[in-house]
Amino acid sequence: MNQVVNIPTLDTLAQELAAIQQTGSKRIALLGSRHVPITHQQLIEMMSYALVLGGNRLLTSGATGTNAAAIKGAMRADPNLLTVILPQSLDRQPRESQEQLQQVIHLVESPENDHLSLGEASALCNREIISRCQQLICFAFHESHTLMQTCQEAEEQRKLVTLFYFD
């Protein structure tokens, strides 16, 4: 019976040790699927609330589902520690998101991506978010291509990545 065992590299172990030992605040990106059950949204909201209460800066995007829950929790804890980076301009976001997004202090729009499909704009947006963070927490389905790609890019940039699967 042969079994493949993934053995962490020395770089990975050093990175994880450094993350555990870091006592100051971190820049944490929280991204995920739009299609999230309400109970999962509540858990994500509590997580973002706790992360921000702990003094961490939270970065996310403006979509419904995971990102909306992250925004809600961070806004309750400390709106100054939340940055939302949109894949396109605010008026291109779903109506149900716009009201919440208008309350965000640090909102970055990307009108230069308005001519792109949402998938293309989201991939660029996720790259921008990853470039600004130290750690990525992602909630996804196995077939969430854009999110899987984002996690891979974050790992290639030696970011600490925590990936939760809904399926």
Image (cartoon, helix red, strand yellow):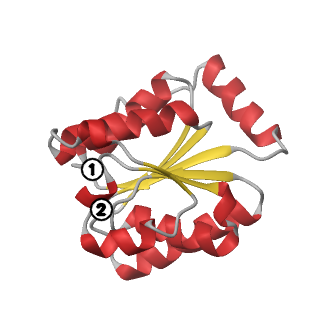
Q: Quadrant of residue 105?
A: bottom right
User: Looking at the image, is 75 positioned above or below residue 32?
Assistant: below
**Amino acid type, label 1:** His
Image check: 134 left or right of 151? right
Image check: 6 left or right of 150? right
- Name the residue carrying label 2: 167
Q: Which of 84/153 is in front? A: 84
Q: Which of 149/13 is in front? A: 149
- Name the residue carrying label 1: 142
Rendered residue at 68%/59% (across/down): 80
Mark 2 nearby-residue class (10 Å; few <14, some 14–19, many ≥20) = few
Residue 5 seen in render: no
Residue 19 seen in render: yes
x and y percent of residue 24 in the render? Answer: 83, 44
x and y percent of residue 74 in the render? Answer: 60, 66
Image check: 101 left or right of 9? left
Of the two numbered discs 1 and 2 on the same chain, state the one appearing first in sequence. 1
The C terminus, quarter of image: bottom left
User: Looking at the image, is 72 positioned above or below residue 127?
Assistant: below
Q: Quadrant of residue 124?
A: top left
Secondary structure of the residue carrying numbered label 2: loop
Rendered residue at 45%/67% (across/down): 102
Image check: 31 left or right of 148? right
The answer to whether the residues at label 1 and label 2 have Cβ atoms under 8 Å apart is yes
**Amino acid type, label 2:** Asp
x and y percent of residue 37 in the render? Answer: 33, 77
